Amino acid sequence: MKNKKIDYKFYIILTLAILIILITVFANYLAPYNPDYQNYEAISQAPNSTYLYCKNE
C-alpha cells in the first residue's frame, strides 16, 4: 500500500473559507449593536459591567 501525500494547503484554505462564510452568516449575532449609535450619557460614567472601557480625555 502506498502512502498518499496529504495536501495541507487545500485544507487550510478550505477551513479559512468556511470560517469567513460562517462569520458573514452570523455577523448580526457576533456584533449585535449598531456601530453608529453613541450613548452620550455613558461618556461621563466610570467603567461598569455594561461599558467596560470608557476613555475620557
Image (cartoon, rainbow, N blue to C red):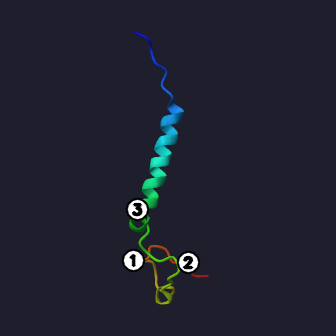
Q: Name the residue under label 2.
A: 55
Tag 2: Cα neighbours inside 10 Å, few (<14), some, or many (≥20)? few
Residue 27 is drawn in which quadrant? Answer: bottom left
Query: Quick check: marks 1 and 2 in contact, CB under 8 Å?
Result: no
For the point 57% across and 81% down, which residue is it?
A: 56
Give whichever of 23, 53 is nearer the camera. Answer: 23
- Asked if the residues shown at circle 2 and circle 3 are in contact, with their CB atoms under 8 angstroms apart, the answer is no
Q: Please name which of the two marks, 1 or 2, marks the residue nearer to the observer.
A: 1
For the residue carrying disc 1, how many other residues have a C-alpha within 10 Å: few (<14), some (14-19), or many (20+)? few
Mark 1–mark 3 distance (CA, rounded to whole Å): 22 Å
Front-most of 37 and 9? 9
Q: Nearer the viewer, residue 7 or 43?
A: 7
**Disc nearer the start of the sequence (1/2):** 1
Q: Which residue lies furthest to the bottom in this view?
A: 41
Label 1: state its secondary structure: loop
Q: Residue 57 location in percent, x, y? A: 61, 82
Which type of secondary structure does the marked residue at label 3 adopt?
A: loop
- Which three-letter amino acid code belongs to the residue tagged 3? Phe
Distance (Cα) linking label 1 and label 2: 14 Å
| Residue where numbered disc 3 is placed | 26
Q: How far, Cα to Cα, is label 2 from label 3? A: 29 Å
Label 1 sits on residue: 50
Which residue sits at x=54%, y=34%?
Answer: 9
Q: In the image, residue 31 lies at what x, y percent?
A: 44, 68
